[in-house]
Amino acid sequence: MTKNYGFDTLQVHAGARPDPATGARQVPIYQTTAYVFRDADHAAALFNLQEVGYIYSRLTNPTVSALAERIATLEGGVGGVCCSSGHAAQIMALFPLMGPGRNIVVSTRLYGGTVTQFSQTIKRFGWSAKFVDTDDLAAVAAAIDENTRALFCESIANPGGYVTDIPALAAVADKAGLPLIVDNTSATPWLCRPIEMGATLVVHSTTKYLTGNGTVTGGAIIDSGKFDWSASGKFPSLSAPEPAYHGLKFHETFGPLSYTFHSIAIGLRDLGMTMNPQAAHYTLMGIETLSLRMERHVANARKVAEWLEKDPRVEFVTYAGLPSSPYHDRAKKICPKGAGALFTFAVRGGYEACVKLVDSLELFSHVANLGDTRSLIIHSASTTHRQLSPEQQKAAGAAPNVVRVSIGIEDADDIIADLDQALAKATA
Ligand SMILES: *Cc1c(COP(=O)(O)O)cnc(C)c1O
């Protein structure tokens, strides 16, 4: 979109226009695998990347493209690619940067699934991750070696009420000539703008707030278009000749769009982690109301966290929106409109009380998800983190006496009343 529209306008309109064939106002679900070529020359130009167009839906699809453009616009990036899940987006984001023997330097405070993906699964590709406390910038700098290809963090880290100092981390990445990748899932672009703070790439699990209604899994990678992929020789996938496209050099040919084009022409083509048009449709529906929902999510989270913190049945609450949080001041800088709607609290009575609490709630759903319109709760120690020792659980912010909540957009009074009755049963 060329006009300087505000966020609320862009979340409804960016990437979409009335369908040129039918005038359909809403983005149609282009439920097709292939697209008819005008003639043989057109087909050849598309396959040579000389002309941009639709070939096959593993690479691009108009419904999915509309969503990618919308998220890229909201994040202030130049291009974006959607994937089948947030975890797919993370692999896709690293793919153009990495190779056997290469590593990434990553925050210790990450979504549990990401910890597993980075500490275990990526080893099968010959990649590795070094986990570092991103509050210790000297340790981050020290962890970077000649094989490091990116830094990775979450803006608001899931789940322990931690906020990353993105500008400080971006400065370390800049100095080392490396891209900074920020997972902005918990914050969304309405609360946090990583690219404006120096991030190179932003990844999302669109499964969460961007879709917002718990219907589909999806992911996205957004490129700032600001990184010089040819400066160091460390990113040959983008700077060196690509044999599969007659020696084409992505960065030289596509400039700021090189990362996006590579992710489609190589990443989606060969890894196949494609978002389907139905999923894109549900996410496009959800994203239209992103700012309205986030405003309510944050307002409710603040009320619930304040109420819990005053309650004698609760030991502590980790929410960066509370003045008691060590990350309160940083949150004001990194996410000035609010610290999200995801936090943990500790229940007096430990493991047993937490299990009783989860079982006694009526409005909350006990699920392994977050970012739904509905209020959600999980007792990590008895579910997602049950394989870990109590020490490991504590380090991961999932101690036996702690539950994680994702505060929904229901009436705050109803959410609080539900917690009140369940806490009474849990600590009786
Ligand atoms: C859920 C989540 C992911 C993984 O996304 P999926 O869509 O479940 O694959 C990654 N990062 C964060 C912060 C998440 O909340």
Image: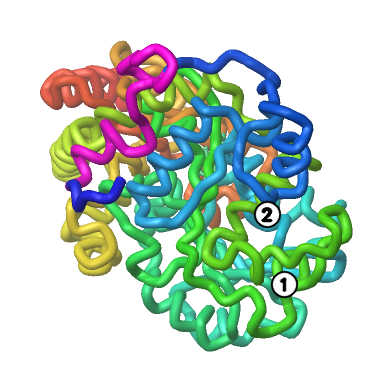
Which quadrant would the C terminus be assigned to in this image? top left
For label 1, the SS is helix
Secondary element at tag 2: helix
Q: CA distance from mark 2 to mark 1?
A: 11 Å
Q: Taking the image as drawn, is residue 159 in sight?
A: no
The residue positioned 16% from the left and 18% from the top of the image is 414
Q: Residue at x 48, y 28 (%)?
A: 369
- Overall secondary structure of the magenta stretch? loop
User: How many numbered discs sit on the rendered protein?
Assistant: 2
**Position above or below: 417 against 330:** above
Which label is found at residue 239? 1
Q: Which residues are drawn in magenta?
A: 6-27
- Drawn side of residue 389 relative to residue 223, left or right: right
Residue underneath mark 2 = 262
Q: Position of residue 72 (x, y in %)?
A: 42, 48
Q: Residue 266: which disc?
A: none
Please say if 354 is above or below 282. Answer: below
Report the coloring of the rendering: rainbow
Q: Is residue 7 magenta?
A: yes
Q: Residue at x 17, y 42 (%)?
A: 302
Residue at x 41%, y 51% (from the top left corner): 160
Q: Front-most of 160 and 118?
A: 118
Q: Quadrant of residue 12?
A: top left
Q: Is mark 2 within 8 Å of ligand 1?
A: no
Three-letter code for the amino acid on which mark 1 is drawn: Ser
Residue 188 locus on image (x, y percent): 35, 45
In the figure, residue 295 lies in which quadrant? top left
| First reached walking from the N terminus: tag 2 or tag 1 | 1
